[in-house]
Image (cartoon, rainbow, N blue to C red):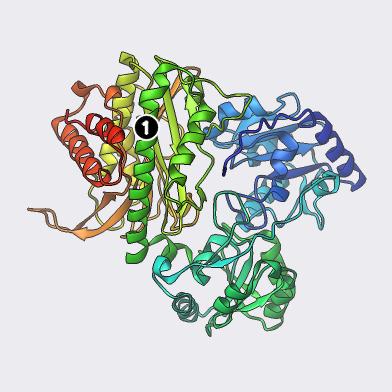
Amino acid sequence: MFQTFDDTADPAFGIERVKRLREELKKRGLDGFLVPRSDEHQGEYVPPHAERLHWLTGFTGSAGMAIVLLDKAAIFVDGRYTLQVRSQVDVASFEPKSLADEPPVRWIEQNLAKGAKLAYDPWLHTVDGVARLKAAAEKAGASLVPVESNPLDAVWADQPEPPTAPVLPHALEFAGEPAADKIKRIANGLMNDDVSAVVLTMPDSIAWAFNIRGSDVPHTPLPLSFAILHEDGRAALFIDERKVGPETRAHLKPIAAIHPRGKLLSALDELGQRKATVLVDPATCASAIHDRLKAAGAEVKRGTDPCELPKACKNEAEIRGTRAAHLRDGRALTKFLAWVGTEAPKGGVDEIAAAKKLESFRAEANELRDLSFDTISGAGANGAIVHYRVTTATNRPLQRGELFLVDSGGQYLDGTTDVTRTVAIGEASAEQRDRFTRVLKGHIGIATARFPEGTSGAQLDAFARMALWKAGLDYDHGTGHGVGSYLSVHEGPQRISKMSNVAFRPGMIVSNEPGYYKTGAYGIRIENLLVVTPPAMIEGGERPMLGFETLTLAPIDLNCVERSLLTQDEADWLNAYHARVREALTPGLDEATLAWLKDATRAI
């Protein structure tokens, strides 16, 4: 099993652990400490030894921060976790706050006493993040101070050891471009920009550049490591060498020198001694690295990670692979949806049983490497918790008259999938059909969008919300995120979001997932993955337009659709999509599932 459902409730969360942390802060003459949900690489998924926010507060979400002062504490989460945080965290110990409405910087300005010392671990905060926090502390008349050793680690007695999972080469048939060519391409860009070297701190960038994959964190094949690429094409990888076996060493030998992870700081010092111009990404690079380079005498140039954009624009092999992955994944999901449609109305199916069954269907083809994230299996009111994670304590049955939301995905060597379907157990109510159809209209609006080069996710986001807005409704998460190629299920820089100004380019993969959530009742989300298609002329048009190809292949529950709310063009899209799903998935399905699929994809 890739997913566990343990109840993470722990009486030590909250009061006891906060007390121990405060005692440690007093010993060090500190008045507070920042506890982000991040490790040295600033990624979404972190290994167990870096789950500091979870250990301290009980919060299991993938984004957030706690601030612990000697007399008060707060935890900050985004709109996905407003319900979850209150169910997991002792609110007597941590006051829940919204990252959007009352961000940490504002809280610091209002709550930090004059002359106070607010501490932070410079390995766990980005350059940009530290700048914002420092300004807030100074505005309060206090100071933000780095620590050499993390005070939370000092009181975490049974903190796990860092992972040593093996790193493996990622075959050229899946990567589509030799690592040597990628490194040369990045080096040429550095040379053109008069930059001596770049420090890569994001493991997904390193995995892409060196054509390697690991398993250091849950659900994402990342090799936790750092790298330095030079303008002359030289490369150095800093990694726990226990992870690097003979096959991987042979793969890396022609393209990079392999060093112990602990040698990174001396390599930074060497760059400083040479007065080298070094590129770091202030949005993702740990402040500790930036500060070390500056102290050593390097000229630090701030800019975007040079791997980010080429990694996002998938090549032909990667697109071919993700199509194959989605075909395989679609068959598994369709078998699951047929099973739910048959078994759930009878009773006896709960959220955990459903998640396990879906994982078993994905595993049948023997090509599943992992889930791409913990399956969100939410029945009834649990479906309204956007990033709900079912445990033995929260597990509830799939009951007639309720909606069931399942958001899941798989990691395959040829691609990463992420798909959400919402289905009615029995009959859907008139309100549920109305809300579902409005979400579907938004989904179709994104799927059918055509747009000129230079268009960003912020410009498309409203397409997904318009039908909801017309009814006075909305949702509090972005409409879509980028997705990697056997890498992170959440990959930048592209997004469909009110906040994203990154222009779409051909080959980018992005999710299309509008939703609606009624607290205490139900949640609705419909998610497919899309790939941006090259610019093409529209008949009668004057400019070539980009568009989207839908990658995901799985039926959308027609029992939740209110046909009268769809335009004829929207109904035609749904019918054409379902015809494509039926044609693509039919080979390899058993007779019972095929019979269910034919009905589930009937024309409306």
Q: Residue furthest left?
A: 540
User: x, y (%) of residue 406?
Assistant: 44, 33
Location of residue 545 (image quadrant): bottom left
**In the picture provided, is 130 more to the left or to the right than 587?**
right
User: x, y (%) of residue 485?
Assistant: 43, 58
Identified at 83% across, 31% down, the residue is 16
Q: Secondary structure at mark 1?
A: helix
Decide: few, some or many residues near mark 1? Use Cα within 10 Å; few <14, some 14-19, many ≥20. many
Looking at this view, is 494 or 303 the one in front?
Answer: 494
**Which amino acid type is shown beneath numbered disc 1?**
Leu
User: x, y (%) of residue 471?
Assistant: 31, 21
Q: The N terminus appears in which quarter of the rendering? A: top right
Q: The C terminus appears in which quarter of the rendering? A: top left
Q: Residue furthest right?
A: 27
Q: Is residue 571 above or below residue 206?
A: above
Q: Is residue 264 above or below residue 165?
A: below
Q: Which residue lies under the disc numbered 1?
A: 337
Identified at 42% across, 44% down, the residue is 418
Q: Residue furthest front?
A: 591
Q: How many marks?
A: 1
Whether residue 139 is visible, yes or no, is: no
Identified at 54% across, 29% down, the residue is 352
User: x, y (%) of residue 123?
Assistant: 71, 57
